[in-house]
Amino acid sequence: MRPVFYDLHLHSCLSPCGDMDMTPNNIVNMSLLKGLELIALTDHNSCKNCPATLAVAQQAGLAVIPGMELTTAEEIHVVCLFPTLEAAMGFDQYVHDRLAPVKNAPEIFGEQWVLDELDQPVAQEELLLINATTIGISHAPAAVAAFGGLCYPAHIDRPSNSVLANLGFLPPECGFTALEVKEPEKFFAGGANGEYWEGYHILSSSDAHYLEQINERERCLHLETADFWGLRGWIEGKRG
């Protein structure tokens, strides 16, 4: 195993809350400038900017996992990651069919752009992507697994759109073995929340909506390979 510096929760300009500078080329190049080796693109309820981002990353020599930040029926955010672009785009369609039929209002929520590998616009997503889907958190792991992916709750230490804020507990039937904690130094300070530290693999990603928010070369995972399969092996392995 070797240390792999990572950021597995990034938004592009497809997310209505994402800055327009969050383009495939800018995301990849900023990640490289910051010394990262493995990133994931996880727009709200969509994978449609994954094709361009993976194409750019392949040319640049950066490992990118295609993914999504799913909003469950309970308005809980869940990071979903996939082994292949084909699997991610299959899940994209699955989620799109279960998204509330509410059109985006760009002047209120922001624009939702799908870009090509030259950062040129090719489409705008019409449905508002930040809405909840009809997928409950108890059904999310099985739905993601059906496409060969893995998932875990996002930013559990936040006061909104997190499993602890919205439910107050982790549903045991979900079988999560990993959790994302935005600020682990605060969340686990003084031995607080020890049940999560002891019982789960902890990731800390940026949830970046702006280029400057992407992780610095500070957080690493010890993986066999810097890709989806290395991450899956770590998440499914023994704690520690």
Image (cartoon, rainbow, N blue to C red):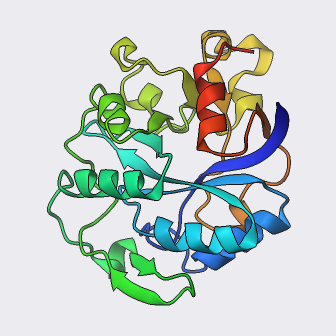
- Image quarter in which the N terminus is found: top right
Q: Nearer the viewer, residue 72 or 192?
A: 72
Q: Residue at x 31, y 29 (%)?
A: 142
Q: In the image, is residue 238 above or below residue 141?
A: above
Residue 184: quadrant of the picture: top right
Residue 146: quadrant of the picture: top left
Q: Nearer the viewer, residue 146 or 32?
A: 146
Q: Position of residue 93 (x, y in %)?
A: 26, 58
The answer to whether residue 27 of the structure is visible from this angle is no
Q: Position of residue 175 (x, y in %)?
A: 42, 17
**Left or right, 222 with reference to 98:** right
Residue 158: quadrant of the picture: top right
Q: Residue at x 66, y 13 (%)?
A: 238
The answer to whether residue 50 of the structure is visible from this angle is yes
Q: Nearer the viewer, residue 40 or 230?
A: 230
Q: Residue at x 46, y 26 (%)?
A: 164
**Left or right, 157 with reference to 4:** left
Q: Position of residue 102 (x, y in %)?
A: 17, 65
Q: Position of residue 240 (x, y in %)?
A: 75, 15
Number of on-image labels: 0
Q: In the image, is residue 204 above or below residue 238?
A: below
Q: Residue furthest left?
A: 101
Q: In the image, is residue 168 above or below residue 179?
A: above
